Amino acid sequence: MICPITTTSYLLGTTFIGLGAFGLASPAQAQLTFGVRPSSPSAAAAGNPETQAFIYSKAGRDLAFGALLVLFQYRRNKPGVTTVMGLAAFAGFVDGLAVYKFAPPDLRPKVWGHCIGASLILAVAVVRYRARLW
């Protein structure tokens, strides 16, 4: 049985909110989960904002995507949900490119996680669009 579209929107939205909260709560760990390393272990331990600015920006983006998905689905704004899903997929592919270009070799396989996740989100957005849920 296929997961209903509304459930998918809420699940994806809360996942993005969780990722954003994780990035704000533990930026150094979130960088490793994303696929990049802090510039130095001492800078990460000290909470140096320069080394964590990227992950704070990503956390804000994830919180915004999550809040928009939940809000648009709650208000039954189908075009809004589909558009945010498409934008989130694009952001996922860009994240994969960033990991590919800047991650150390041992973290480079995380590119697959970004690209597979983005592909799944894009697939749901395309299904929504083709089913006239636009």
Image (tube, grey):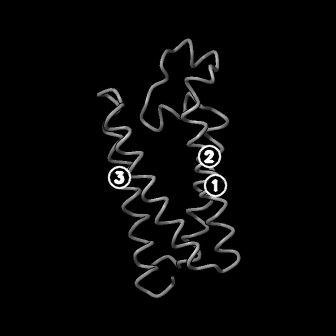
Look at the picture and state if 1 lies above or below 60: below
The answer to whether residue 36 is left or right of residue 4 is left
Residue corresponding to mark 3: 115
The tag earlier along the polypeptide, 3 or 2, is: 2
| Secondary structure category for the residue under label 3 | helix
* 89 is higher (above) or lower (below) than 71: above
Q: Residue at x 48, y 36 (%)?
A: 33
Amino acid type of the residue that numbered disc 3 sits on in the rendered structure: Cys
Judging from the image, what secondary structure is the residue with disc 1 in?
helix
Which residue matches tag 2?
20
Residue 86 position in % (x across, y down): 46, 66
Instruction: Assign a secondary structure to mark 2.
Output: helix
Q: Is residue 37 above or below residue 121?
A: above
Q: Splitting the image into 4 quarters, where does residue 29 fall?
A: top right
What is the total number of numbered labels drawn onto the structure image?
A: 3
Q: Residues within 10 Å of mark 2 (few under 14, many from 20)?
A: many
Q: Are marks 2 and 1 in contact (CB under 8 Å)?
A: yes
Left or right for 107, reference 40: left
Q: Nearer the viewer, mark 1 or mark 3?
A: 1
Rendered residue at 43%/52% (across/down): 92
Q: Which mark is residue 64?
A: 1
Report if the CB atoms under discs 1 and 3 are less than 8 Å apart.
Answer: no
Amino acid type for the residue under numbered disc 1: Ala
C-alpha span from label 3 to label 2: 19 Å
Q: Nearer the viewer, mark 2 or mark 1?
A: 1
Identify the image quadrant of residue 95.
Answer: top left
Rendering quarter of residue 6:
bottom right
Is 109 located above or below residue 66 in the figure?
above
